[in-house]
Image: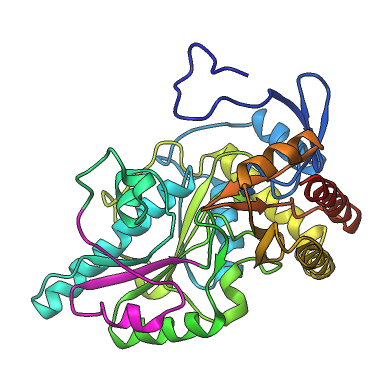
Amino acid sequence: MKHHPTLAKNYAAPPFEAVKGQGVYLYDANGKEYLDFTSGIAVTAIGHSHPKWIKSMENQLHLLVHCSNLFGIPSQQELADSIVEIAGKGRLLFCNSGAEANEALIKFARLFGQKKSKKTGKPCFEIITAYNSFHGRTFGCMAATPQDKIQNGFHPMLQGFKHATLNDIESFEALMNESIAAVMIETIQGEGGIYPADKNFLQKLEKLCKTHNCLLIIDEVQCGIGRTGDFFAFEESGIKPDAIGMAKGLGGGFPIGAIWMGKAYDDLFQPGSHGTTFGGNPLASVSGKAVLSIIKEERLLENVQKNSTKWHQALHKLKEKYPELIKEIRGRGYIVGISVIEAPLIVKKAREKGLLIVPAGQNIVRLLPPLIATADDLSESINKLDDILREF
């Protein structure tokens, strides 16, 4: 397909027009069925057109779609309560996307640094992020994302960011001083190519931040909301971050983002500190409530835990079968990165075979099945990948 004549060219020309989704499948304008292991880039966590989600949204459409945060929103308050039950004592700030969540986290870190500066008398506003990370495309988030392909054409960047190497605690320690307000990392680097942070590294990083009195901020925009089999991917390590960013899967397809702030710091935002017209509006909040309810009622975390082990084993068998094509397999649960030869061509061939996957990093293909994906769905993806790799 060509670019539509009235749409900007910031995306590549689309391969087809998507017109319908049902469960784990997406359908194009010609009626072709695709096993959707992109999940709208980790968004449709409960699959397409989930009937319970649709019913919740329909009910709310008849009541109230939007009123702004000038007024109390019961569904927003209830969603916040549900997330606090999972994340721990603290407060939620709702927005519309992952980039907005991370922008709010940058402001959160600056407010903390300002408070710290009043005590020490020294400037404190810098944030350490990891090389190869991705935090979004707004100006603050671009500065936090040390990738030329993201920053190119938009310099000068916002000042105040330093960068260290994921899983190398010494590289973070070397940057620590009184000017550091926070460390912000992804538990699993998503756009960078599915690189997980080691449990031991996360535990050491938590101690390092406490030692230097700076915030530990975790970006779970892509890897959170059940994708690893835990609600938050960092849970496996046993750490307790000071703030968490989330979005994507939280709304099941409707735009919503949020940050959770731990109780020790939940008073940093005060009236006038930050705002959003649409963030957490009644319809968005109901979408989030429905997703959390479905994850709990249908035991989707257990589904991911139960089925992902055999799926990962099958993926590694493909690596053994095609060692010249597959270099490495990384990830946890339902977020997997496969380092391959000619990733764009494999994505294209997969699409032709009726499997949707998405590239990431340098020659990485991402598999992001919805949390509802069954053992049979995962086996279908293996069979399709086997057919594609055999043709190479």
Q: Can residue 286 be seen by looking at this rendering? A: no
State which region is magenta. Answer: 159-186
Q: Is residue 218 left or right of residue 335?
A: left
Q: Position of residue 384 (x, y in %)?
A: 84, 47
- In the image, what residue occupies the spot 53% across and 44% down? 256
The quarter of the displayed image where residue 206 is located? bottom left
Q: Is residue 151 magenta?
A: no
- In the image, what residue occupies the spot 12% across and 70% down? 123
Q: Residue furthest top?
A: 5
Q: Is residue 175 magenta?
A: yes
Q: Can residue 167 be seen by looking at this rendering? A: yes
* Position above or below: 76 against 328: above
- In the image, what residue occupies the spot 62% across and 78% down? 236
Q: Position of residue 267 (x, y in %)?
A: 33, 66
Q: Is residue 121 left or right of residue 164?
A: left
Q: Nearer the viewer, residue 1 or 130?
A: 1
- In the image, what residue occupies the spot 48% across and 49% down? 98
Q: Position of residue 335 (x, y in %)?
A: 66, 59
Q: Nearer the viewer, residue 240 or 297?
A: 240
Q: Nearer the viewer, residue 67 or 353?
A: 353
Q: Is residue 382 left or right of residue 290?
A: right
